[in-house]
Amino acid sequence: MRIRTTTAAIVAILAVTVVGCSTDKGSVGTVPEAPSAAANSGAAKNAGTPPEPTGAERDAVLEAVHDVNGNLTHDEDKAINAARNQCAALDGGATNPDHAAAQRFSYDGVTLTDDDGSHINFGLRKTLCPES
């Protein structure tokens, strides 16, 4: 239940941010684009969300996540989306990024600890979202 609440809160915050940044007055109150459609947009890049990795970079991200828990990569797209969103949390100054990662990657019957989240963050910093 916490995951759904946390996810809903993050989506709501992102929706408000995207709508609040719009210059089109007619767009207030409209539903923003889905994250996958906005992945390569300027707003996504500004929010710290990297573009979807491909090829060797994608393999490296999946390997980093798999090293923490092999069950997390059964749905590769879900793992990649969680990784991209976690990069936004890391680059956005999340107050407890290890806990955020543990919550974000606790899905499909897998429950992670903050220590697991720390390992995921370490792997993401080595692959998808290095510190700038």
Image (cartoon, helix red, strand yellow):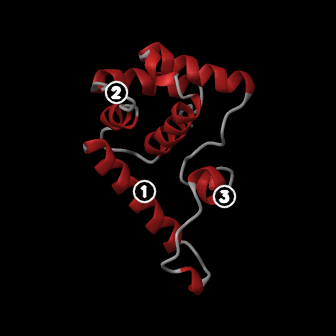
For the residues bearing labels 1 and 2, Cβ distance under 8 angstroms: no
> For the residues carrying marks 1 and 2, which lies nearer the camera in this image?
2
In whole angstroms, how far apart are the C-alphas of marks 1 and 2? 22 Å
Q: CA distance from mark 3 to mark 1?
A: 18 Å
Left or right, 40 with respect to 99, comes to right
Q: Earlier in the sequence, mark 3 or mark 2?
A: 3
Vertical relation: 124 (above or below) 8: above
The nearer-to-camera label among 3 and 1 is 1
**Residue 116 location in percent, x, y?**
34, 21
- Sequence-earlier tag: 3 or 1: 1
Residue 131 percent location from the top left of the image: 53, 34
Amino acid type, residue under disc 3 in the picture: Gly
Discs 3, 2 touching: Cβ within 8 Å:
no
Judged from the image, the secondary structure of the residue bearing numbered disc 3 is helix
Q: Residue at coordinates 49% horizontally, 37% vertically from top-left?
A: 82
Residue extending farthest left:
1
Residue under circle 1?
11
Question: Is label 3 in contact with label 1 (beta carbons under 8 Å)?
Answer: no
Residue 50 image-quadrant placement: top right
Can you tell which quarter of the image residue 132 is in?
Answer: top right
Q: Which mark is residue 42?
A: 3
Classify 10 Å Cα crowding around label 2: few (below 14), some (14-19), many (20 and above).
Answer: few
Residue bearing the label numbered 2: 109
Callout count: 3
Type of amino acid under label 2: Gly
Mark 1 lies on a secondary structure that is helix
Q: Residue at x 49, y 73 (%)?
A: 20
Residue furthest bottom in the image: 25
